[in-house]
Amino acid sequence: MNAKRERAAALLLGVLCCSLSPVLLAAAADASSPAKATTYQVEIRNFAFAPRTLTVPAGTRVVWTNRDDEPHVIASAGGAFAGSHALDTSDSYAITFAKPGTYAYYCSIHPMMVGTIIVQ
Ligand SMILES: [Cu+2]
């Protein structure tokens, strides 16, 4: 009697395990993973960010590159993202914006240099 019950339980477990097939699990993982991150460039040139306002979808990676001979810094106006160190000529700094919002930033060395990333 006990052996019969154990065999039935094992059979039931086997059915449950097989119903969670690896293929289904892989498909679920793909569906929940975010879309591939795209990259947008912001140039720092002549003491200005270009484009000054950039609108991107959530999950976008934004890369700033300094094209001036002077150092510049990317600083978040609201502290919403980590700022850069001083970027020398041709240095880059990247932030991936996961959440929608308006992210104002400026150069802490030249505070008149301002820009905005709008994440949708
Ligand atoms: Cu600057």
Image (cartoon, rainbow, N blue to C red):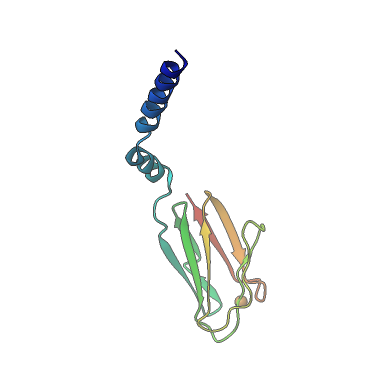
Nearer-the-camera pick, 24 or 39: 24
Residue visible at 65% across and 75% down in the picture? 110
Q: Residue at x 50, y 66 (%)?
A: 52
Farthest residue to the bottom: give it. 69
Q: In terms of depth relative to the viewer, which is nearer, 115 or 35? A: 35
Name which quarter of the figure residue 26 lies in: top left
Quarter where residue 47 is shown: bottom right
Residue 60 location (% of width, % of height): 46, 57
Quadrant assignment, res 86: bottom right
Q: How many marks?
A: 0
In the picture, measured across the screen, residue 53 lies left or right of residue 72, that is left
Which quarter shows the N terminus? top left
Query: Which residue is situated farthest in the top direction here?
Result: 1
Up the image or down, 97 lies above or below 44; here it is: above
Whether residue 67 is situated above or below residue 93 in the rendered picture: below
- The residue lying toward the viewer, choosing from 2 and 45, is 2
**Is residue 68 found left or right of 4 in the rendered image?**
right
Is 118 on the left or on the right of 36, as rendered? right
In the picture shown, does residue 107 fall above or below 71?
above
Question: Residue sitting at 57 percent across and 83 percent down?
Answer: 88
Does 43 sit above or below residue 69? above
Residue 68 appears at what percent x and percent y? 53, 83
Give the quadrant of ligand 1: bottom right
Residue at image x 47%, y 67%?
51
> Which residue ends up furthest to the left in the rendered image?
23
Foreground pick, 10 / 26: 10
Q: What is the x, y in percent for residue 119?
A: 50, 53
